[in-house]
Amino acid sequence: MAAHRPRIVGFCCERHGMDAVVLAARSGKTHDASVRLVQVPCSGRVDGLHILKALEDGADAVVVLGCLEKNCYYDTGSIEGRKRVAYVKSMLKEAGVEPERVEMFNAASTNAWAFPEMVSKMADVVKRLGPLGSGGEER
Amino acid sequence: MIIAKRKPVNEIADMVAPYKKVTVVGCRSCVAICLAGGEKEVKMLISALKVKNRKEGRKQEFDGLVVERQCEKEWIKEVEERILDSDLVLSMACSLGAQTIGDMYPEKIVFPALNTGMFGVPEEQGVWSEKCVGCGNCIIHTTGGICPIARCAKSMLNGPCGGSSNGHCEVNLDIDCAWYEIHERLKLQKRLDLIEKVNPPKDWSTAHYGGRRIYTREDAKLTQHQKKGKEAVQ
């Protein structure tokens, strides 16, 4: 039986976050995970419901990638994103679902290492915790 | 307004676990303002329960809806079909909303997803504080507009107590001493003479201790004749 390939959904801000992803993509590095990126105007636009919906619909883990907090294009968007991620983590913990499945990451546009590191870290988390139930359909 | 807080997700999940079809009903009034049971909170709770079910391999059907005011029968009536078409109604309103649905459809099982806490006001974004306990006999005209029953930890009528320190309460130093605030407010209003006035023991018969309270306004009540006419129209 083939090993489970972690399914990760990433909400990525279109400013520093996406720039960092594009920079990393140019390096041609591959990952042992299936990553779906959702570009958002700002990590502060990511709502707790978006994160939960992704987990509900088949993701094993969700990441939010935003600008560095002190260098956010929209000033406080990354802080909003971090607060929403923290709230979802608390809800998951209450529900008995591992909160480590959801994380917030920050990057500057020049941080080519940020995206691969983020994916690798979350893939390790999913491998350690296993897939999120068997109810999620492969998409 | 009424301030409530969502119960922990695992507690709610345990409550709804035996039921296959769950209708989650939110409210657009007080609990939406205090971010406990509005449209967003209904969606997030359903999603969190689905994620939990996904992890545990459990199958349940959820329907989510929000009514304007869950404590008024007219608004509930509009979603009657969806309420009746469920094994369980999970109310995300205050206890008043949950009880209104329960009273209207006594055969339906209605569970609360929120803990109803207090009468309070939004102080700033994300912060709500208690300012009234609904004692049924308001005295804030004598206390500078500040309620000592709700805002003093000891509900003192003639304060402050000996525990007041630099304007803070001995019960919790993060809380302002209500009687210090009353003093400052009266001073500002040049009505400090009121602070020296001794308040007699409070008449608590108007509070909850006499049992369930029912307020009526005769001019607003419908006569039997009017009720029959209204029923005929409906």
Image: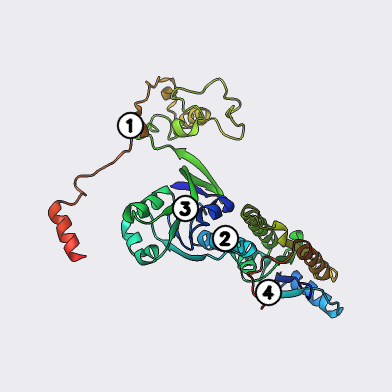
Residue B27 visible in the snapshot: no
Q: What element carries label 1?
A: helix
Residue beneath label 3, please?
A: B31
Mark toward the start of the polypeptide (3 vs 2): 3
Tags 2 and 1 both on a single chain:
yes
Q: What element carries label 3?
A: helix
Name the residue located 46 percent from the left edge and 34 percent from the top edge: B150
Q: Marks 2 and 1, Cα distance to the nearest angstrom?
A: 40 Å
- Chain letter for the residue marked with disc 1 in the picture: B
Q: Position of residue A115 (x, y in %)?
A: 80, 70
**Vertical comparison of A59 with A70: above or below:** below
The front one of A133 and A97 is A133
Whole-number angstrom distance, CA of label 4 to CA of label 1: 58 Å
Mark 4 belongs to which subunit?
A: A
Which of the two marks, 3 or 2, is nearer to us in this view? 2
Structural crowding at the residue carrying mark 4, measured as other residues with C-alpha within 10 Å and reported as few (<14), some (14–19) or many (≥20): few
Q: Mark 1 points at which residue?
A: B210
Q: Position of residue B112 (x, y in %)?
A: 46, 51
Indicate the secondary structure of the residue bearing disc 4: strand
Which residue: 38% across, 56% down?
Answer: B108
Residue designated by label 2: B49
Q: Is residue A27 above or below residue A74?
A: below
Within-10-Å neighbours for mark 2: few <14, some 14–19, many 20+: many
Q: Quadrant of residue A45?
A: bottom right
- Give the class, few, some or many, for how many residues have Cα within 10 Å of label 1's Cα (few <14, many ≥20): few
Q: Mark 2 lies on which chain?
A: B
Provide the residue designation for mark 4: A38
